[in-house]
Image (spheres, helix red, strand yellow):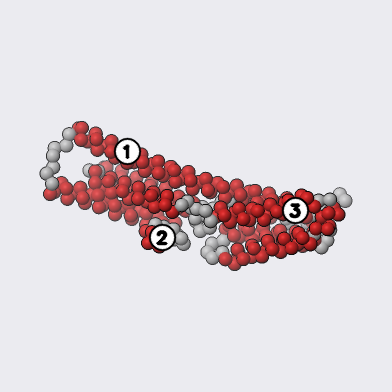
């Protein structure tokens, strides 16, 4: 896998470097194909080209491009499905934390203030985990510590929850907070399998080489160059989406941000009708 990462843009490599590496690999493959074409013309016996030969050649090139398009569509669908899953989990987690926060307002002090603050801190940390660049180990450690503190505070508030008659929903919503933490971690650590990316990369390189070997004339080469640029951008998008913690395209945290705003409402507002 380390050898693969020398050529395929993964890990901490920026998106700009990703685009340049993919484009460079495609251009080299196309130049190799073009060079082989010229060598064949120079040293081989060039038979006169017929309309039938050109038709067969165009058919083969079209078939190769269709296969590449199918591979791109399959990989894009895969990576977008994973992205959409992460996006939905972010919304569902915000709903779970909001419901737990609402249940907390029914508790007596000091449990109410303690759990409200812990949930607010946890929400801030979840937002930071999803948006902060670079090393996130401290944020992850903070996340796990907050979950431990929340669990301890929930257990300490058991009696007051029973007295208020909210013990069942109280435990259910806090259990969901714990569940979504695990689900989001798993979703972020489940990218597109490396074998699929290797196959897509092989498709790109082979297609570029074959196009370089069959295209003639300046006009066709210009069109091929435009195609290579578009393919590069498409694959760069796939690679970026496949890096949920390091890429530039990340799932929206709007649900958590809106939730954090509601947590700024004075808790006395919840008591005005008592």
Residue 74, compared with residue 101, is above or below; it is above
Is residue 220 found left or right of 229 in the rendered image?
Answer: left
Q: Which residue is mark 3?
A: 171
Q: Secondary structure at mark 1?
A: helix
SS at badge 3: helix
What percent of the width, then of the height, locates residue 271?
A: 84, 53
Name which residue lies at 84% across and 50% down: 165
Residue 67, x across and y down, in percent: 36, 41
The picture places residue 119, in percent across and down from the top left corner, at 71, 58
Q: Residues within 10 Å of mark 1 (few under 14, many from 20)?
A: few
Q: Residue at x 62, y 57 (%)?
A: 127
Q: Can see residue 82?
A: yes
User: How far apart are labels 1 and 3 at the CA level?
Assistant: 58 Å
- Residue 63 — which label? 1
Whether residue 113 is visible, yes or no, is no
The residue positioned 41% from the left and 60% from the top of the image is 1
Q: Position of residue 214 (x, y in %)?
A: 24, 43
From the viewer's perspective, is residue 93 above or below residue 46? Answer: below
Label 2 or label 3, whichever comes before in sequence order: 2
Location of residue 188 with respect to 75 vertically, above or below: below
Q: Residues within 10 Å of mark 3 (few under 14, many from 20)?
A: some
* Label 2 secondary element: loop
């Amino acid at each position: 896998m380390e050898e693969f990462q020398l050529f395929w843009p993964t890990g901490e490599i920026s998106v700009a470097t990703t685009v340049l590496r993919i484009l460079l690999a495609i251009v080299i493959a196309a130049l190799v194909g073009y060079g082989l074409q010229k060598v064949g013309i120079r040293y081989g016996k060039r038979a006169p080209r017929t309309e039938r030969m050109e038709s067969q050649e165009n058919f083969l090139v079209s078939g190769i491009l269709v296969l590449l398009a199918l591979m791109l569509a399959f990989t894009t669908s895969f990576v977008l499905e994973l992205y959409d899953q992460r996006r939905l989990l972010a919304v569902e987690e915000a709903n779970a934390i909001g419901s737990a926060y609402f249940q907390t307002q029914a508790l007596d002090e000091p449990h109410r203030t303690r759990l409200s603050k812990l949930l607010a801190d946890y929400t801030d940390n979840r937002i930071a985990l999803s948006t902060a660049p670079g090393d996130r180990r401290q944020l992850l450690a903070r996340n796990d510590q907050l979950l431990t503190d929340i669990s301890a505070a929930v257990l300490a508030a058991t009696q007051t929850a029973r007295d208020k008659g909210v013990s069942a929903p109280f435990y259910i919503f806090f259990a969901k907070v714990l569940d979504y933490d695990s689900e989001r971690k798993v979703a972020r650590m489940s990218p597109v399998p490396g074998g699929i990316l290797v196959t897509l990369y092989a498709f790109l390189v082979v297609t570029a080489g074959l196009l370089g070997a069959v295209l003639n004339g300046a006009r066709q080469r210009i069109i091929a160059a435009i195609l290579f640029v578009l393919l590069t951008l498409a694959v760069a998008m796939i690679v970026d989406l496949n890096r949920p913690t390091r890429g530039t395209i990340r799932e929206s945290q709007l649900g958590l941000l809106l939730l954090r705003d509601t947590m700024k409402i004075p808790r006395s507002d919840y008591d005005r009708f008592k």
